[in-house]
Image (cartoon, rainbow, N blue to C red):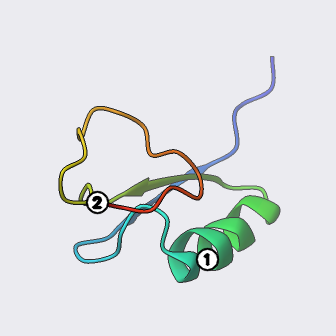
């Protein structure tokens, strides 16, 4: 069984979960290069932090 790709964890203190610069640019570039990517960041206001953010959903 092959080993999984290496994991990179991107930690954001101020960027929202769907921030284009972090997710669509940096995260996508890392994934394209073969890395598994995890983005840990604060949940938007009034969102249940345990619920996944729907792609394209506006925070708040």
Residue 26: numbered disc? 1
Q: Quadrant of residue 39?
A: bottom left
Left or right, residue 29 beside residue 20? right
Position in image of residue 20 (x %, y %): 57, 77
Please name whichever residue, 26 or 45, is drawn nearer the observer in this view of the structure.
Answer: 45
**Up/down of 4 relative to 29, above or below:** above
Extreme-bottom residue of the structure: 21
Which residue sits at x=34%, y=33%?
51
Extreme-top residue of the structure: 1
Where disc 2 sits, the SS reads: loop
Where disc 1 sits, the SS reads: helix
Q: Quadrant of residue 45?
A: bottom left
Local packing at callout 1 (Cα closer than 10 Å; few below 14, some 14-19, many 20+) is: some
Please name whichever residue, 14 or 51, is drawn nearer the observer in this view of the structure.
Answer: 51
Q: Which residue is mark 2?
A: 60
Left or right, residue 48 beside residue 11? left
Local packing at callout 2 (Cα closer than 10 Å; few below 14, some 14-19, many 20+) is: few
Extreme-left residue of the structure: 46
Position in image of residue 32 (x %, y %): 81, 63
Which residue sits at x=66%, y=78%?
25
Please name whichever residue, 8 or 18, is drawn nearer the observer in this view of the structure.
Answer: 18
Q: Quadrant of residue 28?
A: bottom right
Q: CA distance from mark 1 to mark 2?
A: 24 Å
Q: Nearer the viewer, mark 1 or mark 2?
A: 2
Between disc 1 and disc 2, whose residue precedes? 1
- Quadrant in which the C terminus is drawn: bottom left
**Up/down of 22 relative to 52, above or below:** below
Left or right, residue 59 beside residue 57? left
Position in image of residue 41 (x %, y %): 30, 60
């Amino acid at each position: 069984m092959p080993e999984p790709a290496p994991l990179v964890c991107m930690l954001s203190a101020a960027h929202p979960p769907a921030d284009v610069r972090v997710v669509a640019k940096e995260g996508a570039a890392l994934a394209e290069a073969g890395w598994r990517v995890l983005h840990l960041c604060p949940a938007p206001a009034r969102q249940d932090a345990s619920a996944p953010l729907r792609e394209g959903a506006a925070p708040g």
